[in-house]
Amino acid sequence: MRIRATIPSAALAACLLLSVPAAAQQQTDSARLAAVERQLQALTRELERQTLGAEVVVADTAVLGFGPAASKVYRVGQGVSIGGYGEIVYNNYASELENGDLRPATTRDVIDALRGILYVGYKFNDKLLLNTEIEVEHVREIFLEFAYLDYRFSDAFGARAGLLLAPMGLVNELHEPPVFLGTSRPLTENAIIPTTWRENGIGVFGGVGPFAYRAYALSSFDGVGNAASGAGGFSAGGIRGGRQRGANALSEDFGLVGRLDYVGTPGLLIGASAFTGETAHNRTLPATGAEVGGRTLIWDLHADFKVAGLDLRALVAGATVDDVIELNALRGLTGAGSIGEELGGWYVQAGYDLLRAAGTTHQLIPYARYEALNTQKEVPAGFTANPANDRTVLTVGAAWKPIPEAVLKVDYNKHSNEADTGLSQLSVALGYLF
Amino acid sequence: MLAVALGATASACSLSAQTLTQDEALALAFPGARIERRTAYLTEAQLARARGLAGEGVQVESEVVTYYVASADGRSVGVAYFDAHRVRTLPEVLMVVVGTDDRIRRIEVLRFQEPPDYRPPAGWLDRFRGRPLDRELSTRGSVPALTGATLTANAVTGAARRALALHQVIGPFEASK
């Protein structure tokens, strides 16, 4: 392709008057104009090279004996990528429970620097990159939340290994506060899909047509709990305590987790995900010596739609746990403290940006969320379900974003349960990402 | 030798994260057309007007704007603007092609340094086709959000607004008449 360059005559004349020495004035006007035009052309080309990057502007040439296309990877800029997010949350609890009793003395209003996160990535080349997230929770607890290497063979297929986020639900992989509505994450994506859920593993990812997929083999939950990883084990409140978080994780059992999303319509994400794996890590019952499996299955269907100021989201999730009698025995759980054999929950959420037509960067988004979940939908014979675990939460609030990367959220969360012991709260959250 | 062969094969695979050069991008947008490289030197008044047109939150900093006018059979068929900006912490370079109707014809990603997961997908970029510079050209307007890549969506939309604002101020098709 031949590209011809021209310079506006007014600019040329100005440069000519300022820069041409007296001796050169003997030359013809056309020769001097041509010389200045070349100089300006060189300057604007250099400016473009500085602004866009040499690998974009420089003509394609071979590197290291490869043809131009094959050698591109060697010219791609490399280096460190840094980002982060954080949130500070204030919770003000009602003085009375749903049934009118005074709230427990142990429940106090709190303000917490809940999370401060630093993303650090390194792009070795266009195929291989490292991505890490270092998290400080509650000011003094430090976690490596994820750390993995990606090797992208093509857009359709890549391999990923390391400390991975389980690709389930809507929040586990995307939980930066300005991105989701609500001062707190939905309970369903806390007790059933236990965000932030990460374990060591290996897997594949990619996109084919309008679909995106991820599938990993991860070290499984520890349903019983162990001190080395800090996992507390499954409980009546859900499977959250089974997370080993990649720390000295028992790996007698591995699980498989995957998701498939339709992303062919911009603004819409709709899909499903599932996990299955045994969770007892070959433990045996002391009384009989029988090995315990504790297979756990978690699934969810989810949809997210954002367009024209609307922010709509819905998710339904469920889980089943096998060998609960044995897991209860290993954990010493009795009565209403049993792990649920079946768990279920769902939520719907909607928000709308009132300022979208106001010609300002500010956003004001009133929102509402309703969810229901029960972490003891079924318990084994001989155990009872605690009605306090059959819960609903109605959240009504608003988010103000002066820019898309910063948010102040205020909401009221009305908690109810079948035992009438729900404790409602007013919450304020400050969040940011960069 | 084996390593060289494997490297060449892998590099030849389709990989959207790879860099596209200016020449390649222009050839994609204007196959067979004659390309003329021009530079506009904006006055303060023109710069202020461009900023006003681009809108709040979209930076228009440079007084020197290089653009590429394509013509075929002696008639202008479009103009390409190249825009470099930061997504999160690393740069992205886009080509915004504007048709003779002053609407976006296409957007191509030439360079994307953030992790590939945040790269704008082609299907989403296609949604810019035919859009003029108006209030709807915004992620809060009728440009759909990118789930999980908010900063990318904002950066691309800002670049599109900036290119169209400069386009209106420069008037490249008027200059070629």
Image (cartoon, coloured by chain):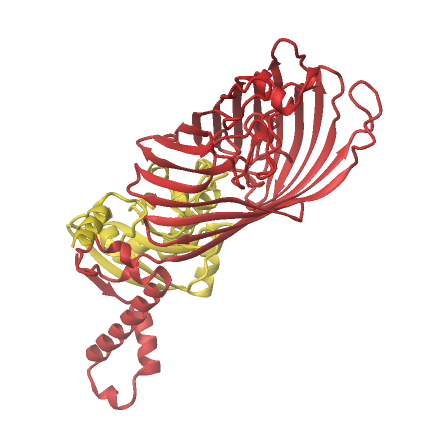
Q: Residue at x 23, y 59 (%)?
A: B36
- Give the total number of marks visible in the rendering: 0
Q: Residue at x 47, y 40 (%)?
A: B139
**Residue A135 visible to the viewer:** yes
In the depicted structure, whether residue A15 falls above or below residue A250: below
Left or right of A363 on screen, residue A105: right
Left or right of A294 on screen, residue B160: left
In the depicted structure, whether residue A45 falls above or below residue B84: below
Q: Quadrant of residue B153?
A: top left
Which part of the image, by quadrant, shows the C terminus of chain B? Answer: bottom left
Pinpoint residue B99: horizontal percent, then vertical percent. Answer: 29, 46
Q: Which of the pair A196/A67 is nearer the observer?
A: A196
Pinpoint residue A397: horizontal percent, then vertical percent. Answer: 66, 32
Q: Quadrant of residue A410?
A: top right
In the depicted structure, whether residue A302 falls above or below residue A376: below
Q: Which of the pair B27/A59 is nearer the observer?
A: A59
Which part of the image, by quadrant, shows the N terminus of chain B? Answer: bottom left
Left or right of A358 on screen, residue A210: left
Q: Which of the pair A231/A77 is nearer the observer?
A: A231
Left or right of A68 on screen, residue A21: right
Chain that is coloured yellow in the picture: B
Pinpoint residue A172: horizontal percent, then vertical percent. Answer: 52, 34
In the depicted structure, whether residue B121 falls above or below residue B165: above
Chain that is coloured red in the picture: A
Q: Which of the pair A429/A225 is nearer the observer?
A: A225
Pinpoint residue A17: horizontal percent, then vertical percent. Answer: 33, 81
**Residue B75 visible to the viewer:** no
